[in-house]
Amino acid sequence: MKHFFFICIFILGFVFHISAATLSYSLQMANSQMKRSGSILTWDYPSGLFVESILKVYDQYAGDTYYNYTLNYAKATVNSSGKIASGYSFTAYTLDNINPGKFLMQVYATGNASQYKIALDTLRKQLTKHPRTNNSSTGGFWHKASYPNQMWLDGLYMGTRFYANYEKTFNNGANYDDVVNQFTLIHSKTYDATYQLNYHAWSATPTDANSFWANQTAPFLGCSKEFWGRGMGWYAAALVDVIEILPPTYSRRAELVTILNQVAAGIKRWQDPTTGCWFQLLRYNSSTVSSKGTHNFLEASSSCMFTYALLKAIRLGLIDSSVYSATAAKAYNGVVTTFITTDTNGDLSLNGICSSAGLGPSTNKTRDGSIDYYLDGSDAGLIVSNDLKGVGPFIMASVEYEKSVNTAVNSVENNPSGFQLITYNQLLTVKSTSTNINRIQLFDCRGNELTNLQVNSKTEISIPTANYPSGIYFLKINDSKAGKFVL
């Protein structure tokens, strides 16, 4: 007796024009950078960022090499008594020092070594004593003690992700409101609805000598004057990561989702239409030049961070995939095309990274937040390769991309036994788990036959889908019994 299996498939709503090697970019870059960096011994935020990205590779693909690399970093920077090694200073009160705590949370969760809990508690105590704007318990964390009463977008990434994770793991979410307040405060001060972007930083005391870069008048009193790409990248990534940590039942989670959607709209608006990447100064293109004639440039780390944030937000259902999928796809293609190179040994490099950028303090008046600074500053204007502030986000973006294009289509209603469907790099792959495949027919929604493959008892068949538009399709396997799928 013959039966018919009809499988209703939504082909991916966006098409990636990259070779199959792209699916392993996270692994390739992880391997390349681990070889370049060797053993990392210093507790600092770029190292923490990179090691966290290695953990994401481990979570996606397993492999002792990746986990051991992160474990060795933990052992090198936290001694047996729980003291954090070189690079950390409690009384410097810098949020940058908090960032490696995010990776350490996962290492502790895996092994429960007591010294790591002591180190995590130290970081949490730093936040308890960390100075806040206007010396208020409800104020925003200073970016550093050397930047009094200043909040930077960067700091939201450095501090809140660890804070939220610690509260969830050890404190039953008692201080979630404080985490959310950090975002709502800085967003209320720095978000410019006209441009749909956030200014790099805000000072609660703009007349302070260390805030010489700040606007002295409303409507953006205390804000810096430009929209810096990586600053916005830190902020977007922080929003997505913190929302993921917060329980869906937590009432104020929705406030961050609203902010994220505002930020995502700005990211989409200022994407370069040609390359799919983003510029160092977001609201300008390459026609903007400094007084020295330096053109605004496409910047890798911000482009990677935006790509990561969009892909992850789509995966988590935080933003509308029908609006942002094409943007994310174009971004990932753009990053690979614009910034990635491969040497003769097969090692990947990420190029076009802004070395660093900041504002002040009063002893460094060149860091004034001007167009000239971001394009010609001794740090902000320096373009480098393989800086961990770019490599880490590239690996994270790649993992998210790889999740999006290697998705099993078997977690839907009425999934038939005996077959597994996988959408994978412009291919729809049918795998047999019990009954061999002899014939596959693919139809569009009007019943037009697109593919008719007859084979001799295969266990796996792949159908190219790159030329098919978004929509519903039907698959008939072995002229068998009907079963309807809506994905």
Image (cartoon, rainbow, N blue to C red):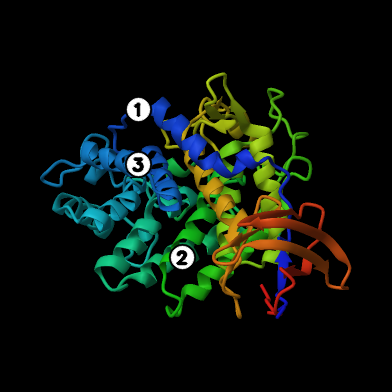
Identify the residue at image location x=75%, y=72%: 479
**Labels 3 and 2: the sequence-earlier one:** 3
Residue underneath mark 1: 38
The C terminus, quarter of image:
bottom right
The amino acid type, in three-letter code, at marker 2 is Glu
The amino acid type, in three-letter code, at marker 3 is Ser
Residue 455 sits in quarter: bottom right
Which mark's residue is nearer the viewer, 3 or 1? 1
Secondary structure beneath label 3: loop
Report crowding for label 1: few under 14, some 14 to 19, many 20 or more residues within 10 A (C-alpha).
few
Cα separation, mark 3 vs mark 2, equals 31 Å
> Residue 305: percent from the left, percent from the top?
55, 47
Residue underneath mark 2: 244
Cα separation, mark 3 vs mark 1, equals 31 Å
The N terminus, quarter of image:
bottom right
- When the figure is inspected, residue 379 is found, relative to residue 49, above or below; the finding is above
The amino acid type, in three-letter code, at marker 1 is Gly
Which mark's residue is nearer the viewer, 1 or 2? 1
Residue underneath mark 3: 146
> Residue 474: percent from the left, percent from the top?
77, 70
